[in-house]
Amino acid sequence: MVTYSFSVGGVNREAVAQEVLGSAAKILLLTGYSEDEVGELFQQAAGQMLSGEAVGRIDDAGDFAPDENALDEVDIWSLAQKFEDHTAVKALNRLNKRASTLDDLDDPQALAKAIALLTEAIRLRHDAITWLRTEAAEAGIEVVGDREEWIASATDDQLDQEDSLLFLDDYRWSGDFNWYLVGQVARALAETGDREALTSFSSVVLSDNLGLQVPVREEVERSVETISSYEDFSRYVRSHSSAGELAQAEFLDRFIRQTGFSNGTYPLERWLDAMSRRGELERYKRANRWRILVP
């Protein structure tokens, strides 16, 4: 191990002492002490030094007993360094570089590639988080999955100890992976109308064991909520078979009025687009307006 030492030979100790005492006096004055009170404090400190009751004596172990909360924080930082060196975390770092090259998820091939990549990322995160939980338990550190949820129910005393807890949704445990890709994939699956695939995907990524960040989980939950109306929309579309050309705007507005669909027209348009690619209907523009034709 490399060690470093510092020499103080040749330093003007009197100048250093004057600078330190002057700075201390200025700080005390800024906090509201009068000049007389500052003088009295210095006299008291001098008396304690002479009597052997000095504040901060090096040989007084009690004055330098480490704060229990500080130890917890140091343990977490030490754990974070070990976490970064974990094999699964390093693999996540590499996987994130591959994820950055993904194309538009509207492309079925790009979406399939993203799902395969996330499947591996989730496996790696599960391994890393399992290791992290074990290490934290051995160090006596409490692990919490959701910081916001914990804060909402924590007592004042618990909030004061927040820094001694390990929150899985903290970025330091992300493995530097772009987990927002999870929400993007969930949204893309919802837009294709593939309810079965989204249900399977969401059951994995919403697991409490993964500890993904709240915005990511919320995006997945919104996608699941949206696709729950897909079957209703599909039946609505099929009910217009052989009805001739339909103006898309009026067609969608009518569905929203009939069903109370509350997520706007964008997901409906994406569903129509996916149905068109699968040959379930024709979607085209005429007179600068979108039209659909259900065979």
Image: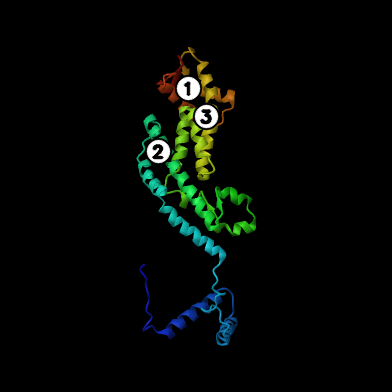
Q: Position of residue 5 (x, y in %)?
A: 37, 75
Q: Is residue 263 visible?
A: no
Q: CA distance from mark 3 to mark 2?
A: 23 Å
Residue 160 lies, with reference to residue 186, above or below; the image says below
N-term-proximal mark, 2 vs 1: 2
Q: Amino acid at mark 2?
A: Leu
Mark sitting on residue 248 = 1
Question: Closer to the observer: label 3 or label 2?
Answer: 2
Q: Which residue is mark 2?
A: 117
Q: Label 1, secondary structure: give it.
A: helix
- Precedes in sequence: disc 3 or disc 2: 2
Q: Which mark is residue 43?
A: none
Disc with the residue nearer the chain's start (3 vs 1) = 3
**Which tag is nearer the camera, tag 3 or tag 1?**
3
- The kind of residue tagged 3 is Ile
CA–CA distance between discs 2 and 1?
36 Å
Q: Mark 3: few, some, or many residues within 10 Å (few <14, many ≥20)?
A: many
Q: Quadrant of residue 256?
A: top right
Element carrying mark 3: helix
Q: Secondary structure at mark 2?
A: helix
Q: Which mark is residue 227?
A: 3
Q: x%, y% of residue 232?
A: 55, 23
Quadrant in the picture for the C terminus: top left
Q: Quadrant of residue 6?
A: bottom left
